């Protein structure tokens, strides 16, 4: 739910803008026709236009925050080295990718799994290696 929040915030900004614009226009029109006696037309137009402007400006703020988050994620991936869980492999080159058991992206181990399904060879993470009683390939 909280992974890649920048993309979700972009969608929220777009939805916020559309709903705000439609809601502001609807509020201006409804105030004019429903109010007894009818509100002055100028006030209803000001309410509708002001709501549209506030909605657009606030959605820009949300969208800008999401852009910052997306770019920081990309920068973090380039600048911050990933932790190396493979130090126990004794001079073997660490592989990075997606675990074939749990799907987590991390450092991988080439493992031999012997169980009721037979002998299988998989690239697995440290946790799955320990949980499945694997042997190093």
Image (spheres, rainbow, N blue to C red):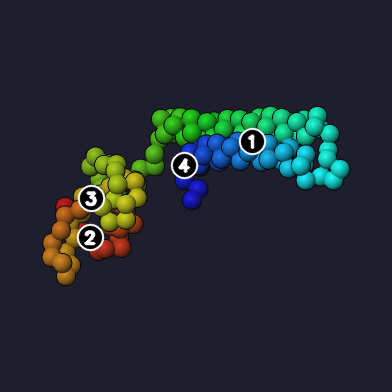
Left of 62 or right of it: where is 93?
left
Q: Which residue is mark 3?
A: 123
| CA gap, disc 4 and disc 1 | 27 Å
Residue 7 in percent (x, y) is at 48, 38
| CA gap, disc 1 and disc 2 | 58 Å
Sequence-earlier tag: 4 or 2: 4
Number of callouts in the render? 4
Rendered position, 83 above or below 133: above
Q: Which residue is mark 4?
A: 4
| CA gap, disc 1 and disc 3 | 51 Å
> Are the residues tagged 1 and 2 within 8 Å (C-beta)?
no
Residue 137 in percent (x, y) is at 16, 52
Sequence-earlier tag: 4 or 1: 4
Label at residue 134 = 2
Q: Secondary structure at mark 2?
A: loop
Q: Is residue 85 visible?
A: yes
Which of the two discs, 1 and 3, sits closer to the camera?
Answer: 1
Label at residue 21 = 1
Q: Is residue 58 visible?
A: no
| CA gap, disc 3 and disc 2 | 11 Å
> Are the residues tagged 4 and 1 within 8 Å (C-beta)?
no
């Amino acid at each position: 739910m909280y992974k890649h929040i920048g993309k979700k915030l972009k969608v929220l900004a777009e939805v916020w803008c559309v709903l705000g614009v439609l809601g502001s226009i609807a509020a201006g029109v409804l105030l004019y026709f429903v109010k007894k006696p009818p509100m002055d037309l100028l006030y209803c137009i000001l309410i509708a236009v002001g709501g549209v402007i506030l909605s657009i400006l606030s959605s820009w703020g949300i969208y800008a925050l999401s852009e910052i988050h997306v770019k920081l994620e990309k920068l973090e991936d380039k600048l911050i080295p990933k932790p190396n869980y493979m130090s126990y492999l004794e001079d073997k080159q660490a592989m990075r990718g997606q675990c074939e058991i749990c799907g987590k992206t991390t450092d991988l181990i080439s493992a031999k799994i012997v169980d009721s399904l037979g002998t299988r060879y998989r690239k697995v993470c440290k946790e799955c290696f320990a949980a499945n009683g694997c042997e190093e390939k």
